[in-house]
Image: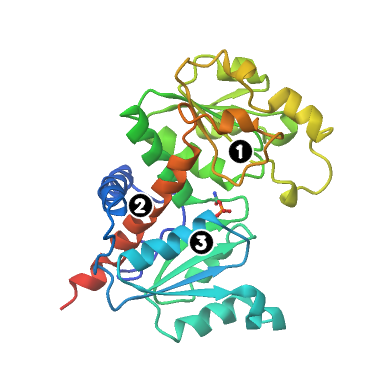
Amino acid sequence: MAASGAPPFRHLLGIAPLETGEIEALLDTADGFVELNRRSDKKLALLRGLTQINLFFESSTRTRTSFELAGKRLGADVVNMSVGVSAIKKGETLIDTAMTLNAMHPDVLVVRHHDSGAVALLARHVRCAVINAGDGSHEHPTQALLDALTIRRRMGRIRDLTIAICGDIAHSRVARSNILLLTRLGAQVRLVAPPTLLPAGMDRQYGVAVFHDMRAGLEGADIVMMLRLQTERMQGSFVPSLREYFHLYGLTWEKLETARSDALIMHPGPMNRGVEIDGVVADDINRSAILDQVEMGVAVRMACLDHLTRHLRAAP
Ligand code: CP
């Protein structure tokens, strides 16, 4: 994993700093953990004696729970800091909070924050590994890794697949991390969104194709990855109405007709049923990989914790 400081302080702040080989190694390690997680005895002692603190400034179901399970299954002592009842509520700054936690000698901090760049800022003030669990609309690296693992296991490969990422691209850290990762691993990525939700120039910046018409964007696609309409990050109106948005960009069987007949349907969750995806499509057990994504999340987060703490375990 690319170091963002002199070893041994290595972080996972985004997909951008990772080498392709490091991404593949993480996916290979996670693959092994999938099998472990399906056993009745899921416990390993790889992280025994190490301390992981989960610090979430934004709400989360999947990411926070899976990081907690991941740490516990690897034998770490896991602490979930509740921002709502912490000194942050009394006005303590992000840096002061980071330095306070750092003084307790954690080995890994898992951080989600509503501001892009906040996790990288925090990482500069601590002497342990920091994992970005989502920062603003910037990156959500472990989501992209679990999406890649889901695709690799379901389709057998990522290279040369046509992957349509659809919806609120503008506010989506999931989209950004997935674009970086999937293009790096050789997929043909398309972005499908209304012009108000798709920043200009992304085609040139990321080497992707851009579509504003859903049926055209899905034509021949192997994977259809839907994104949540992130109304909490919107200032002003980006869509005329939710009903109109669903009519034009909501995933239905009818719009899926132009995709491959076996195209896999993905969504990072949480879903807005009837806004970006029809509930009937989301629940189709043959076509939807949405719950697979949740399962892969635990394995991928175990792999990240494992890789980031190997240097600690190697020490005499
Ligand atoms: N996909 C995702 O990050 O979900 P949560 O907000 O529930 O963690």
Taking the spot 83% from the left edge, 41% from the top edge, the residue there is 237
Disc 3 Cβ-to-ligand 1 distance below 8 Å: yes
Residue at 68% across / 41% down in the picture? 272
Residue at (62%, 80%) from the top-left corner? Answer: 86
Q: Secondary structure at mark 3?
A: helix
- The answer to whether residue 1 is seen in the rendering is no
Among the 4 quarters of the image, the one containing residue 305: bottom left
Colour mode?
rainbow
Work out which quarter of the rendered image holds the C terminus and state it: bottom left
> Three-letter amino acid code at disc 3?
Arg
Residue 156's tag is none
Instruction: Check the picture and name the quadrant holding the N terminus.
Output: bottom left
Residue designated by label 2: 299
Circles 1 and 2 in contact, beta carbons < 8 Å: no
Q: Which residue position is annotated with label 1?
A: 227
Q: Position of residue 287 (x, y in %)?
A: 48, 26
Work out how far the residue at label 1 is from the one at label 2, CA to CA, in angstroms.
22 Å
Vertical placement of residue 39 versus 147, above or below:
below
**Circle 2 residues within 10 Å: few <14, some 14–19, many ≥20:** many
Q: What is the C-alpha distance between the residues marked 1 and 3?
A: 19 Å
Which secondary structure, mark 1? Answer: loop
Amino acid under disc 2: Ala
Residue tagged by mark 3?
Answer: 64
**In this view, 246 is above or below 7:** above
* Comparing labels 1 and 2, the label whose residue is closer to the camera: 2
Where is 2 relative to 310, above or below? above
